[in-house]
Amino acid sequence: MISPRYYLICIALILGLTMVISWVRQTRSRKDFLQIMLWVTGSLIASFILLMGFSELLVFLGIAQSGFL
């Protein structure tokens, strides 16, 4: 079971990145803000999937031990 602390950290990270990107791009509408939030969330999910896939590849090739990540 994942600790609720990690969910809060993920939410804070997504909101923080969204706020910074919105401030840099000078967005004012809710639609733009939500589009940026979806983009940030999708990017973080894609990064996590790529990281997990890379770790499984290292295990398959015998470079790393299972469960190292």
Image (spheres, helix red, strand yellow):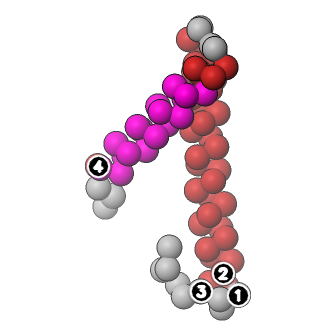
The span shown in magenta is 5-21
Please tell me how crowded label 3 is: few (under 14), some (14-19), or many (20+) other residues with Cα within 10 Å. some
For residue 32, above or below residue 50: above
Residue at disc 3, secondary structure: loop
SS majority, magenta: helix
What's the distance in space between the residues labelled 1 and 3, CA to CA?
8 Å
Residue that carries the numbered disc 4 in the rendered image: 4
What is the quadrant of the N terminus in the image? bottom left
From the top left corner, tell me how far across and down residue 56 is, in percent.
Answer: 63, 76
Residue at disc 1, secondary structure: loop
Q: Earlier in the sequence, mark 2 or mark 3?
A: 2
Query: In the image, what residue type sits under mark 4?
Result: Pro
Residue that carries the numbered disc 2 in the rendered image: 58
Please tell me how crowded label 2 is: few (under 14), some (14-19), or many (20+) other residues with Cα within 10 Å. some
Residue that carries the numbered disc 3 in the rendered image: 64
Which residue is pictured at 63% across the width and 23% down the height?
24
What's the distance in space between the residues labelled 2 and 3, CA to CA?
5 Å
Which residue is pictured at 29% across the width and 55% down the height?
3
Query: In the image, what residue type sits under mark 1?
Result: Leu
Q: Quadrant of residue 11?
A: top left
